[in-house]
Image (cartoon, rainbow, N blue to C red):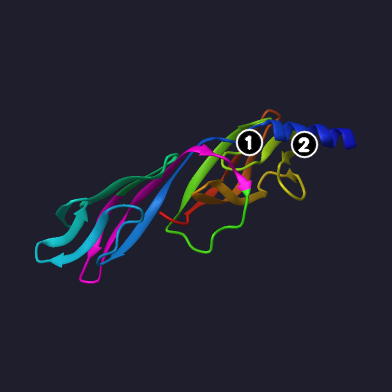
Amino acid sequence: MAAAIALALAACLSRPAAGPLAYEGPYRVDLAVSQTLPGTAVRYLGVTPRGARVRLGDQEVIRLAGDSLEADVRPHPTLFIRYRLRVYAYDEQALHALGTVRVEMAEAQPRAAPLPAAAALRFTAPVTHRVPRGGVIPGTPIVYEGKVEGRARLGGLPGYPDRNVGDSIVWEGQVHPRVFLKSTFRVLLIEAGWLTVVGTVEILVPSL
């Protein structure tokens, strides 16, 4: 038994969890006058009879409801953030926009860590992962070790290692010097060679 545990632990440690990782999900922002889109030079300047005044870098433009509000930013050499938003309302106090945000990490190295109390950027992305036996659930150090008595056997997860179809898998930690994740999955399908999970990942970027 001890030998089997040692072999399983060695196998987990031998599988590098580092690699590219990307999440995209819905995002809404309410920019007060003089406030910027997190991490960018996009700033709301106020309202005029012609529309909303917005500064895009060194350019001032007028935006109406339905107009785009887009920005790309690279706050770290291995971190890229893309905003694709549409203005849906604005007034003397704030500009309101919604759309999607995408976070791409060229090098993700998951490790358990407490989540930050506050974040400059926070959003939730839906995910579906089909993980091969011996593979890692993306954005986590959790390894699918195979099907044991009808259950999924997981490595790299503290506590009870087995999950039935419909059971939850929860992990939170840091995956990049600037990015933290809170992942909540449900087991959808257990096969001898594959594990399918669905769920959501909350992405937190403390500072931009």
Quick check: 137 above or below 113?
A: above
Residue at 58% of width from left, 40% of height from top?
109
**What residue does disc 2 label?**
9
Q: Position of residue 25 (x, y in %)?
A: 42, 48
* Residue type (three-letter) at the residue carrying disc 2: Leu
74 in the magenta segment: no
Residue at 49% of width from left, 49% of height from top?
178
- Disc 2 to disc 1, how far (Cα)? 14 Å
Residue at the extreme right: 1
Residue at 74% of width from left, 39% of height from top?
153
| Image quadrant in which you'd find residue 144 | top right
> In terms of sequence position, does the residue under pointer 2 or pointer 1 come before the other?
2
What segment is highlighted magenta in the picture? 85-111
How dense is the environment of label 1, judged by Cα within 10 Å: few (below 14), some, or many (20 and up)?
Answer: many
104 in the magenta segment: yes
Say what secondary structure mark 2 lies in. helix
Q: Position of residue 78 (x, y in %)?
A: 45, 39
- Say if mark 2 contacts mark 1, CB within 8 Å: no
Residue at the extreme left: 49
The secondary structure that dominates the magenta segment is strand
Q: Position of residue 143 (x, y in %)?
A: 68, 37
How dense is the environment of label 2, judged by Cα within 10 Å: few (below 14), some, or many (20 and up)?
Answer: few
Quick check: 118 above or below 85?
A: below
Of the 4 image quadrants, the one containing the C terminus is bottom left
- Which is closer to the viewer, label 2 or label 1? 2
Q: Position of residue 7 (x, y in %)?
A: 81, 31
Say what secondary structure mark 1 lies in. loop
**What residue does disc 1 label?**
136
| Image quadrant in which you'd find residue 29 | bottom left
User: In front: 184, or 58?
Assistant: 58
